[in-house]
Image (cartoon, rainbow, N blue to C red):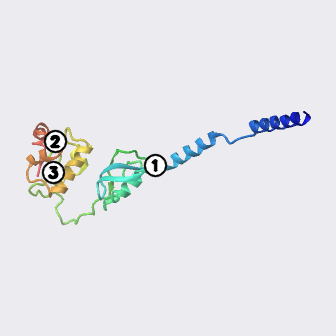
């Protein structure tokens, strides 16, 4: 009988020790999974549009956490005559689907020869002076944004269309640009030229 009691006590003590033995908490596994997911999120690509005074305007793919400076570099950098990116915050982080318009500060033109006339020479299709029509084949994003109803995205579409099709032969071809219908083209007809 004594043996049975001692064996029972041994079994109870073993079960009690096993039940109270410290175990690894599942929370540490959740933290490890969360950290792995966070580390993976930083490598997801994002796509932004870079327009304006960059060498290769258009869509660029960047890693998450990229900054405006990275987007400009991915678009080929600033145009050759640019001194700086102007008032663009190069350190700002970009987000997926964003439009970044760069208006660079350019070097001043070289001094002119004193014997040369200082008045601009009018050439066909080249407007001069304020209020002159904007030449669709030469306009920058800045020039086009000054037109009524044209924002940075539409200005970039006009430039992209011009580059893809070798320029505009007539003002009516403005309707070939995605997003410009007959009403907008009619509103711009007297403000643009080719």
Image coordinates for residue 127, horizontal then vertical, percent: 13, 51
Work out whether residue 76 can be spotted.
yes
Image coordinates for residue 17, horizontal then vertical, percent: 79, 38
Residue 81's label in the rendered image is none
User: Which label sits in the foreground, 3 or 2?
Assistant: 2
Do the residues under discs 1 and 2 have CB atoms within 8 angstroms? no
Cα–Cα gap, marks 1 and 2:
34 Å
Q: Residue furthest right?
A: 2
**If you read the primary sequence from the N terminus, does the residue marked by circle 1 or circle 2 appear first?**
1
Cα–Cα gap, marks 3 and 2:
14 Å
At x 22%, y 48%, the residue is: 157
Which residue position holds label 2?
180
At x 13%, y 39%, the residue is: 181
Local secondary structure at mark 2: loop
- 8 left or right of 127 in image: right
Which residue position holds label 3?
136
For the residue carrying disc 3, how many other residues have a C-alpha within 10 Å: few (<14), some (14-19), or many (20+)? many
Work out whether residue 133 can be spotted.
no
Q: Quadrant of residue 182?
A: top left
At x 12%, y 44%, the residue is: 175
Local secondary structure at mark 3: loop
The N terminus sits in image quarter: top right
């Amino acid at each position: 009988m004594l043996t049975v009691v001692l064996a029972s006590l041994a079994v109870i003590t073993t079960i009690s020790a096993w039940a109270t033995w410290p175990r690894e908490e599942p929370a540490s596994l959740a933290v490890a999974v969360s950290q792995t997911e966070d580390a993976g999120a930083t490598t997801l690509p994002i796509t932004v549009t870079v327009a304006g005074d960059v060498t290769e305007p258009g869509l660029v793919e960047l890693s998450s956490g990229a900054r405006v400076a990275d987007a400009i570099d991915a678009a080929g950098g600033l145009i050759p005559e640019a001194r700086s990116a102007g008032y663009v915050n190069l350190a700002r982080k970009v987000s997926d689907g964003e439009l970044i318009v760069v208006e660079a500060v350019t070097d001043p033109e070289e001094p002119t020869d004193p014997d040369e006339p200082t008045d601009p020479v009018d050439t066909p299709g080249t407007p001069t002076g304020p209020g002159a029509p904007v030449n669709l084949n030469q306009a920058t994003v800045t020039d086009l944004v000054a037109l009524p109803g044209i924002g940075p995205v539409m200005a970039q579409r006009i430039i992209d269309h011009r580059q893809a099709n070798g320029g505009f032969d007539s003002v009516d071809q403005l309707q070939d640009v995605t997003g410009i219908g007959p009403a907008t083209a009619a509103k711009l007809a007297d403000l643009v030229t080719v």
